[in-house]
Amino acid sequence: MILERTLVVAYLVACIGIGIFASRKVFGSDDEYWVAGRRIGTWVNALAIMASLASGGSIIGVMGLAYAQGIPATLALFAGAVVGFPLASILVARPLRRFGRYTIGDFLVFRYPSRVVELVVPLVIVVAFTIYIVAQLKAVGITAEALLGMRYDVALVVATVVFVLYVSFGGMLAITWTDVVQGVLILMVVLGTAAVLLWQIGSPFELVRQATRAAPALGRVSGEGAASYIGYFVIWATAIPVIPHIVMRVFTARDPESARLSLNLAMLAYSVMILAAVLAIVPAGKLDFPELADADLLFLRLMESYFPAVVRGIAVAAVLAAVMSTTDALLLATSSAIAHDLLGRFLTRPVSGRAGGERQLALARIVSAWAVGALALYWALSPPELISRFYTAGIGLLSAGLFVPTIAGLWWRRANLAGGVASLVGGVAVYVAALTGWLALPVAPIVAALSASAVGMLLFGALGSADGPAMLDEIAALHRDEAAPSA
Amino acid sequence: MKGFFSMRAAERAMLLFLVLFSIFAFLPAWREIEVAGMVLLGWWMALLMVLSPAMTLAVFLWRRRR
């Protein structure tokens, strides 16, 4: 236990050190703080994107979900995320990188200039990402409890303080540096564990065959039914192109081509990691631990039974890395939604003098990061079950509100203010109503919400006044080098 | 398609492939047929997770080389 704890403490101290070091470079500049000066290279960005998406959900949660709900449901959820990457690469990476601001909110407010958009977009991001952060904190707590013998609540407090510290002071630069280390660690542990299990038991086909013979439900469509499978898939496929912590990574790339290539490479690494977890580690776990009370503990139980203390220490660090690499990016994106998108637009307007406004914003960045961290910590003390499903519901809110307005705003000439506002508000309203049961529908909530969002864009877009040529010229400039001959 | 900003043909084809393959993978028939202990829906999803990144990367590199 001492060795595992020493490795984890060393890892946490290194994260804080990186944050403090990065803070010297980023404190005085929005460009440096939010998007690391827009000079992150392709490979570094790819690893950082992969690590940002590979959350505690992707290690603890993916295995827990597959164990409890079966492999097909889990693959449907994560295949959605993998399909979301090409959508992001083709539909948003280049034009948004050319747009050259800081957040998805910047683009939506530019495209649909309205107080409603200024207010609703950051609120949706804050709600969805706070849910996401709570799920990550649960992963920290159960990992530390199971493998380090720490109390759940103590582990939550320590982890929250560490990642809020390095995010609030070091910004995107600190996140990028830590994410690269975390990405390597995550890949190494998941792929290494899968390789050991495959070497001991056989091919993925053989593992799946053996596990489903013992537990047939593992390979079948679970009781939730097809609607929820399609719902999981659609949520993630439509979330990736607009999810703020991935979009901010697009803005950090040194140029639009680098942004696209890094998304593609990240997708490849993420895909391999998820397949290794679901097709190798989960079947092996089901054979060894057929009756786990908490499915999210599967990976940790396997680590305990197959590997020595050093490897377990590295595995704990990898789970922490997965959680922190996502949570830090989520925290920065949430903090940007509050400090940049909301406070930056509303509260600093009356301030006379540039220096006063900058000081206010720097303070707002730090205070908002700590406030979101504290709120998520409080919620995580009484955590939900099955973290992957829980945070997927939160991410659905983002897709429901932001996907149609963003894609239509970038690609459809007839998108306009009325359509954008109706699409945003309609998508969010229908998703919340369907998810909470106010609206009983025969399809998954996300499918209904995206349909409502698209109808809002079409209907109110037709009723509202068309955008002027200046706006269309600006959007056309974002696509100019796309250079395809007109269809 | 005059209402839309133009997109490269290879990328349009890639998007179309992803949409069609996703629809195909979710066809009700695949929820009952089992191969190696798992319903085909699961295997199609696994295949999609391999094809999607591999093809997108190939299209990107091919277009960049040209």
Image (tube, coloured by chain):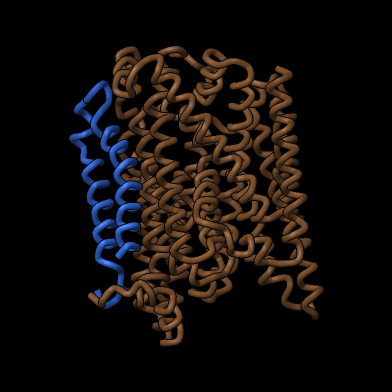
Chain colours: A brown, B blue
Q: Residue at x 27, y 25 (%)?
A: B38
Q: Residue A468 versus residue A384: which sits nearer the camera?
A: A468
Q: Residue A406 versus residue B46: which sits nearer the camera?
A: B46
Q: Residue A282 versus residue A184: which sits nearer the camera?
A: A184
Find residue A117 and report its horizontal and vertical position in percent: 54, 68
* Vertical position of residue A214 compared to residue B32: above or below: above
Residue farthest front in this picture: B65
* Vertical position of residue A399 compared to residue A39: above or below: above
* Vertical position of residue B34 compared to residue A135: above or below: above
Give the left or right position of residue A377, taking residue A68 as reference: right
Q: Residue at x 32, y 75 (%)?
A: A483
What quarter of the picture does the N terminus of chain A occupy? top right
Q: Is residue A64 visible?
A: no
Q: Residue at x 66, y 23 (%)?
A: A145
Find residue A138 and report its horizontal and vertical position in percent: 61, 33
Q: Is residue B23 visible?
A: yes
Q: Residue B56 versus residue A337: which sits nearer the camera?
A: B56
Name the image quarter holding residue A232: top left
Find residue A249 and report its horizontal and vertical position in percent: 54, 57
Name the image quarter holding residue A141: top right
All told, the count of numbered labels is 0
What quarter of the picture does the C terminus of chain A occupy? bottom left
Give the left or right position of residue A389, taking residue B2 as reference: right
Name the image quarter holding residue A462: bottom left
Q: Residue at x 48, y 44 (%)?
A: A393
Find residue A218 and report its horizontal and vertical position in percent: 35, 22
